[in-house]
Image (cartoon, coloured by chain):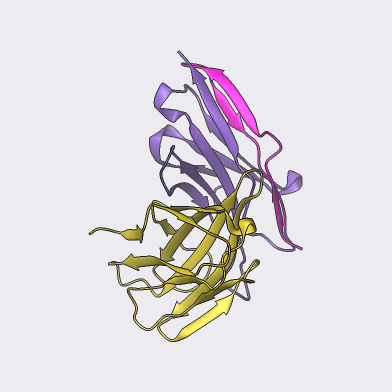
Amino acid sequence: AQSVTQPDIHITVSEGASLELRCNYSYGATPYLFWYVQSPGQGLQLLLKYFSGDTLVQGIKGFEAEFKRSQSSFNLRKPSVHWSDAAEYFCAVGATSGTYKYIFGTGTRLKVLA
Amino acid sequence: NAGVTQTPKFQVLKTGQSMTLQCAQDMNHEYMSWYRQDPGMGLRLIHYSVGAGITDQGEVPNGYNVSRSTTEDFPLRLLSAAPSQTSVYFCASSHTSGSLNEQFFGPGTRLTVL
Protein backbone atom coordinates (compact mmCIF):
# COMPACT_ATOMS: atom_id res chain seq x y z
CA ALA A 1 0.00 0.00 0.00
CA GLN A 2 1.10 3.53 -0.64
CA SER A 3 2.30 5.46 2.37
CA VAL A 4 4.25 8.56 3.23
CA THR A 5 6.32 8.97 6.38
CA GLN A 6 7.58 12.23 7.79
CA PRO A 7 9.66 11.12 10.77
CA ASP A 8 9.99 14.54 12.37
CA ILE A 9 6.85 16.00 13.93
CA HIS A 10 8.58 19.20 15.05
CA ILE A 11 11.84 20.83 13.98
CA THR A 12 13.36 24.00 15.39
CA VAL A 13 16.13 25.88 13.60
CA SER A 14 17.73 29.27 14.00
CA GLU A 15 17.18 31.91 11.37
CA GLY A 16 19.93 31.68 8.78
CA ALA A 17 20.63 28.02 9.46
CA SER A 18 20.14 25.31 6.88
CA LEU A 19 17.09 23.08 6.88
CA GLU A 20 16.32 19.53 5.82
CA LEU A 21 12.90 17.97 6.24
CA ARG A 22 12.68 14.24 5.70
CA CYS A 23 10.11 12.34 3.67
CA ASN A 24 10.06 8.63 2.92
CA TYR A 25 7.47 6.95 0.75
CA SER A 26 6.28 3.49 -0.07
CA TYR A 27 4.99 2.92 -3.57
CA GLY A 28 5.27 0.17 -6.15
CA ALA A 29 6.50 2.38 -8.97
CA THR A 30 8.10 5.78 -9.28
CA PRO A 31 5.52 8.08 -7.77
CA TYR A 32 4.68 11.68 -8.29
CA LEU A 33 6.08 13.54 -5.27
CA PHE A 34 5.09 16.86 -3.80
CA TRP A 35 5.92 19.20 -0.97
CA TYR A 36 3.26 21.58 0.32
CA VAL A 37 3.51 24.30 2.96
CA GLN A 38 0.73 25.39 5.28
CA SER A 39 1.08 28.72 7.04
CA PRO A 40 -0.94 29.19 10.22
CA GLY A 41 -4.66 29.45 9.51
CA GLN A 42 -4.16 28.95 5.78
CA GLY A 43 -4.66 26.24 3.22
CA LEU A 44 -1.82 24.32 1.65
CA GLN A 45 0.40 25.80 -1.05
CA LEU A 46 2.58 23.82 -3.43
CA LEU A 47 6.32 24.30 -2.92
CA LEU A 48 7.62 21.90 -5.56
CA LYS A 49 6.93 18.63 -7.32
CA TYR A 50 8.80 15.76 -8.94
CA PHE A 51 7.56 13.64 -11.80
CA SER A 52 10.62 12.41 -13.65
CA GLY A 53 14.00 13.51 -14.96
CA ASP A 54 16.43 15.52 -12.88
CA THR A 55 16.24 14.23 -9.34
CA LEU A 56 16.97 17.64 -7.82
CA VAL A 57 13.99 19.93 -8.17
CA GLN A 58 13.75 23.59 -7.38
CA GLY A 59 10.68 25.18 -5.89
CA ILE A 60 9.38 28.48 -4.69
CA LYS A 61 10.75 30.46 -1.75
CA GLY A 62 14.25 29.06 -2.21
CA PHE A 63 13.34 25.44 -1.42
CA GLU A 64 14.67 22.39 -3.23
CA ALA A 65 14.13 18.65 -2.89
CA GLU A 66 16.04 15.61 -4.02
CA PHE A 67 14.47 12.35 -5.12
CA LYS A 68 16.52 9.32 -4.12
CA ARG A 69 15.02 6.15 -5.49
CA SER A 70 17.40 3.86 -3.61
CA GLN A 71 16.32 5.36 -0.31
CA SER A 72 12.66 5.97 -1.24
CA SER A 73 13.14 9.51 -0.04
CA PHE A 74 12.24 13.00 -1.16
CA ASN A 75 13.81 15.34 1.39
CA LEU A 76 13.16 19.07 1.35
CA ARG A 77 16.05 21.48 1.85
CA LYS A 78 16.73 25.16 2.19
CA PRO A 79 20.24 26.63 2.61
CA SER A 80 19.22 29.53 4.86
CA VAL A 81 15.93 29.66 6.72
CA HIS A 82 13.99 32.88 7.17
CA TRP A 83 11.59 33.59 10.04
CA SER A 84 8.72 33.59 7.54
CA ASP A 85 9.39 29.92 6.78
CA ALA A 86 7.81 28.92 10.08
CA ALA A 87 4.92 26.73 9.01
CA GLU A 88 3.84 23.13 8.64
CA TYR A 89 5.23 21.16 5.74
CA PHE A 90 3.57 18.19 4.10
CA CYS A 91 5.05 15.64 1.77
CA ALA A 92 2.61 13.90 -0.58
CA VAL A 93 2.65 11.03 -3.03
CA GLY A 94 0.47 10.93 -6.11
CA ALA A 95 -0.54 7.70 -7.76
CA THR A 96 0.86 7.27 -11.27
CA SER A 97 -1.97 5.00 -12.35
CA GLY A 98 -5.49 4.16 -11.39
CA THR A 99 -7.62 6.39 -9.23
CA TYR A 100 -6.77 10.04 -8.87
CA LYS A 101 -5.32 9.98 -5.41
CA TYR A 102 -2.89 11.70 -3.15
CA ILE A 103 -1.43 10.34 0.06
CA PHE A 104 -0.22 12.98 2.50
CA GLY A 105 2.32 12.58 5.24
CA THR A 106 1.49 13.65 8.77
CA GLY A 107 3.42 16.89 8.46
CA THR A 108 6.46 18.52 10.05
CA ARG A 109 5.99 21.73 11.99
CA LEU A 110 8.92 24.10 11.61
CA LYS A 111 9.76 26.68 14.23
CA VAL A 112 12.35 29.36 13.45
CA LEU A 113 14.28 31.06 16.22
CA ALA A 114 15.29 34.68 15.73
CA ASN B 1 -9.47 34.86 -9.55
CA ALA B 2 -10.67 34.08 -6.06
CA GLY B 3 -9.25 30.54 -6.35
CA VAL B 4 -10.89 28.05 -3.98
CA THR B 5 -13.27 29.53 -1.45
CA GLN B 6 -14.83 27.82 1.54
CA THR B 7 -17.62 28.86 3.86
CA PRO B 8 -18.01 29.06 6.75
CA LYS B 9 -14.56 29.52 8.29
CA PHE B 10 -15.71 28.35 11.69
CA GLN B 11 -18.71 26.31 12.80
CA VAL B 12 -19.90 24.78 16.05
CA LEU B 13 -22.53 22.06 15.92
CA LYS B 14 -24.31 19.91 18.43
CA THR B 15 -24.26 16.15 18.05
CA GLY B 16 -26.92 15.05 15.61
CA GLN B 17 -27.21 18.32 13.73
CA SER B 18 -26.65 18.44 10.00
CA MET B 19 -24.91 21.05 7.94
CA THR B 20 -23.28 21.73 4.60
CA LEU B 21 -19.76 23.00 4.08
CA GLN B 22 -19.56 25.04 0.92
CA CYS B 23 -16.71 24.95 -1.58
CA ALA B 24 -16.40 26.83 -4.84
CA GLN B 25 -13.64 27.38 -7.37
CA ASP B 26 -13.45 29.80 -10.26
CA MET B 27 -10.59 28.17 -12.18
CA ASN B 28 -12.75 25.81 -14.26
CA HIS B 29 -11.03 22.83 -12.63
CA GLU B 30 -12.44 19.40 -13.33
CA TYR B 31 -11.21 17.79 -10.15
CA MET B 32 -12.32 18.70 -6.67
CA SER B 33 -11.84 16.96 -3.35
CA TRP B 34 -12.51 17.23 0.35
CA TYR B 35 -9.95 16.45 3.04
CA ARG B 36 -10.05 16.50 6.77
CA GLN B 37 -6.99 17.43 8.81
CA ASP B 38 -6.51 16.02 12.26
CA PRO B 39 -3.48 16.44 14.54
CA GLY B 40 -0.82 13.84 13.82
CA MET B 41 -2.77 12.34 10.93
CA GLY B 42 -2.07 14.66 8.04
CA LEU B 43 -4.78 15.13 5.45
CA ARG B 44 -7.20 12.33 4.70
CA LEU B 45 -9.38 12.23 1.61
CA ILE B 46 -13.13 12.17 2.28
CA HIS B 47 -14.69 12.38 -1.19
CA TYR B 48 -13.60 13.56 -4.58
CA SER B 49 -15.10 14.43 -7.95
CA VAL B 50 -13.63 14.08 -11.42
CA GLY B 51 -16.23 16.30 -13.03
CA ALA B 52 -19.79 17.55 -12.77
CA GLY B 53 -22.14 14.71 -11.90
CA ILE B 54 -19.34 12.31 -10.92
CA THR B 55 -18.23 11.70 -7.35
CA ASP B 56 -16.45 8.92 -5.51
CA GLN B 57 -15.41 7.97 -2.02
CA GLY B 58 -12.02 8.59 -0.55
CA GLU B 59 -10.35 7.15 2.50
CA VAL B 60 -12.82 8.31 5.18
CA PRO B 61 -16.26 8.83 3.60
CA ASN B 62 -18.56 7.62 6.37
CA GLY B 63 -20.89 10.29 7.70
CA TYR B 64 -20.39 12.59 4.72
CA ASN B 65 -22.21 13.12 1.44
CA VAL B 66 -21.20 15.12 -1.62
CA SER B 67 -22.69 16.13 -4.92
CA ARG B 68 -21.31 17.98 -7.93
CA SER B 69 -24.07 19.59 -9.95
CA THR B 70 -21.80 22.25 -11.45
CA THR B 71 -18.11 22.48 -12.25
CA GLU B 72 -17.68 25.29 -9.74
CA ASP B 73 -19.31 23.92 -6.60
CA PHE B 74 -18.62 20.87 -4.46
CA PRO B 75 -20.51 20.98 -1.15
CA LEU B 76 -19.84 18.55 1.67
CA ARG B 77 -22.80 17.50 3.80
CA LEU B 78 -22.62 16.16 7.31
CA LEU B 79 -25.76 14.12 7.80
CA SER B 80 -25.75 13.76 11.59
CA ALA B 81 -22.74 15.38 13.19
CA ALA B 82 -20.67 13.42 15.70
CA PRO B 83 -17.81 14.58 17.96
CA SER B 84 -15.44 12.42 15.86
CA GLN B 85 -16.09 14.81 12.97
CA THR B 86 -14.46 17.68 14.85
CA SER B 87 -11.69 18.62 12.45
CA VAL B 88 -10.43 21.15 9.96
CA TYR B 89 -11.88 20.57 6.51
CA PHE B 90 -10.12 21.55 3.31
CA CYS B 91 -11.50 21.66 -0.18
CA ALA B 92 -9.05 21.37 -3.07
CA SER B 93 -9.21 21.48 -6.85
CA SER B 94 -6.91 20.69 -9.74
CA HIS B 95 -7.03 21.34 -13.45
CA THR B 96 -6.84 18.05 -15.25
CA SER B 97 -6.93 14.35 -14.66
CA GLY B 98 -4.39 12.39 -12.72
CA SER B 99 -2.58 12.96 -9.48
CA LEU B 100 0.39 14.64 -11.12
CA ASN B 101 -1.36 17.97 -11.00
CA GLU B 102 -0.97 20.59 -8.35
CA GLN B 103 -3.90 20.87 -6.01
CA PHE B 104 -5.17 24.29 -5.00
CA PHE B 105 -6.52 24.44 -1.49
CA GLY B 106 -9.13 26.59 0.13
CA PRO B 107 -8.46 28.28 3.51
CA GLY B 108 -10.33 25.59 5.45
CA THR B 109 -13.36 25.29 7.72
CA ARG B 110 -12.77 24.59 11.38
CA LEU B 111 -15.65 22.47 12.68
CA THR B 112 -16.34 21.64 16.31
CA VAL B 113 -19.03 19.12 17.22
CA LEU B 114 -20.14 19.18 20.85
| Span of residues in magenta | A1-26
Task: Judge whether A34 appears above or below A17 on screen.
Answer: below
Residue A14 located within the stretch drawn in magenta? yes
Residue A44 located within the stretch drawn in magenta? no
- The picture quadrant where one finds residue B63 is bottom right
Chain A: its colour in the image is purple
Q: Picture coordinates of residue A12 (x, y %)?
A: 58, 21
Q: How many marks?
A: 0
- Which chain is the one coloured yellow? B
Foreground pick, A107 / A40: A40
Judge from the rendering whether residue A17 lies leftward or rightward of residue B74; answer left or right. right
Q: Is residue B20 visible?
A: yes
Foreground pick, A3 / B15: B15
- The picture quadrant where one finds residue B56 is bottom right
- Residue found at x 66% / y 43%: B40
Q: Is residue A52 visible?
A: no
- Residue found at x 50% / y 65%: B34
Q: Picture coordinates of residue A66 (x, y %)?
A: 59, 41
Q: Picture coordinates of residue A44 (x, y %)?
A: 45, 48
